[in-house]
Image (cartoon, helix red, strand yellow):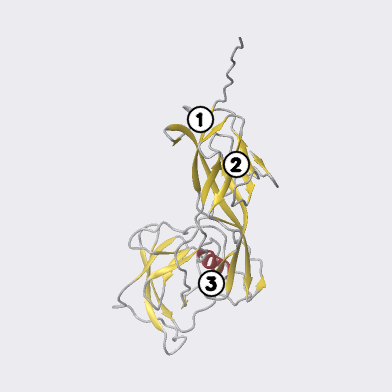
Amino acid sequence: MTTTGRRRWLPLHALTALTCALFWVAFAPTGPAQADDCLVLDPVTGQITYVCNGDEPGEPGGPGDEGGGGSNGPSCDLKPPGTFCVGPNSCYWRDSVVPFAPPKSPPPTPDAEWKVRVCIGANLAESFDAIWIDPANPPTPPLIDQAWTAIGQLAPPVGELSVNPTTRSLVSLPTWFWADGLSGDDLTGSSAFGLVAIATPDYIEVDPGDGSGAVQCPWTTAQSDTCSHAYERSSATRGRASVDGHDAYAASGTPVWSLAFELNGNPINIPGAPPEFRGQTMDAGVWVAESQAVVTSRR
C-alpha cells in the first residue's frame, strides 16, 4: 500500500459508537455510587434511557470535576427484569412503591418523589432501596459521562469506498482508493451540560482485502493517488467478493476522526475519553487479473 503522508500499521481498537440519546438522572443514593456503567431511569419520562460507560466509581460533580471511569459496556450481567447496573448487580425500578416505606432522609426539595430500586445479586437475592428523585435539580454528571453523551450526538456521514481502475485492475498496477460522500468538515455533538465533542477528519483506514493488512491513508475524498496499493496476485480463486462475475478482493475503508472536547467554549482534556471516532466501514470489490504479454512473429 502506498500513501502520501504518514504511514501507520497499528490496528486500532474499535470505538462503539453510541446512537441513543443520553440523559442524567438525579437521585440521592443511600451510599456512594457503585459504578458509572449503568442504564438508569429518566425521572421525567419514566423510561430507561441514559447510558453511561466506565468502571470506576464517580460522583456527580460540577463543570470542573473530572470524575467517572474509563471502560465501555455495563458492569454487570443484565438479566431480566434488570435494566441497569449498580456495580455488579442487575437492577430495575419498581412501578409501585407499595408496601415499602419512604426514605428515612427528608426530601431534597418539595417536588422530590421517591422510588424503589430493586437489585439482584450474584446469588439471585434481591435488595431494595427507597430513593428520592428530584427532576427539577439534576446534578451535573462527571465529564467522562458527558463526553460519551456528546459522542453519541455525533452524526457522521456515510461514504462510499471508490477505486480506480473501476472495473479490472492488474497485478503490480497501483489501485487507488478514496472515500466518496465524505467532506473535510468537522463534526460536533454536545451534551445537555455544555460539553461539546469535536470530531476532525484524520485518516481513512484501508484494508485492500488481499491479506496484506490495513494501513492508514490520508483523508482522501476525491480521486487521487495519495492512497494506492499494488496487488501482488490476481483475485481469481482468492477473492471473497465479486465484480462483473469475477472473483474480487473484498477491500474496505473506515473513516476515522480525531476527537477533542470543549466546555463552555474552552478546550478541555477528559481522562478516559476516546481519542478517535470511527465511522461506518465502506466496502468495495477489486477485481485483479494477471497481466499477460502477447508475442507475435514478423514475416
Q: CA distance from mark 1 to mark 2?
A: 16 Å
Q: Position of residue 63 (x, y in %)?
A: 61, 76
Q: Which residue is pictured at 37% across the width and 67% down the height?
A: 92
- The answer to which of marks 2 and 3 sits earlier in the sequence is 2
Q: CA distance from mark 1 to mark 3?
A: 47 Å
Q: Which residue is pictured at 59% across the width and 32% down the height?
A: 231
Question: Which label lies toward us, 2 or 3?
Answer: 2
Residue 275 vs 246, above or below: the answer is below
Q: Quadrant of the N terminus?
A: top right
Q: Are marks 2 and 3 in contact (CB under 8 Å)?
A: no
- The answer to which of marks 1 and 2 sits earlier in the sequence is 2
Q: Which residue is pictured at 55% across the width and 42% down the height?
A: 163
Q: Residue furthest bottom?
A: 110
Between 3 and 93, the residue placed more toward the observer is 3
Quarter-of-image position of residue 269: bottom right
Q: Which residue is pictured at 29% across the width and 78% down the height?
A: 98
Residue type highlighted by circle 1: Ser
Quarter-of-image position of residue 100: bottom left
Residue type highlighted by circle 2: Trp
Between 80 and 261, the residue placed more toward the observer is 261
Residue 28 vs 200, above or below: the answer is below
Q: Quadrant of the C terminus?
A: top right
Q: Position of residue 239 (x, y in %)?
A: 48, 32
Between 111 and 169, the residue placed more toward the observer is 169
Residue at which label 1 appears: 235
Residue at which label 3 appears: 191
Residue neighbourhood size for the residue with mark 3, other residues' Cα within 10 Å, grouped as few (<14), some (14–19), many (≥20) = many
Q: Residue furthest front?
A: 299
Residue at which label 2 appears: 176
Residue type highlighted by circle 3: Ser
Between 75 and 66, the residue placed more toward the observer is 66
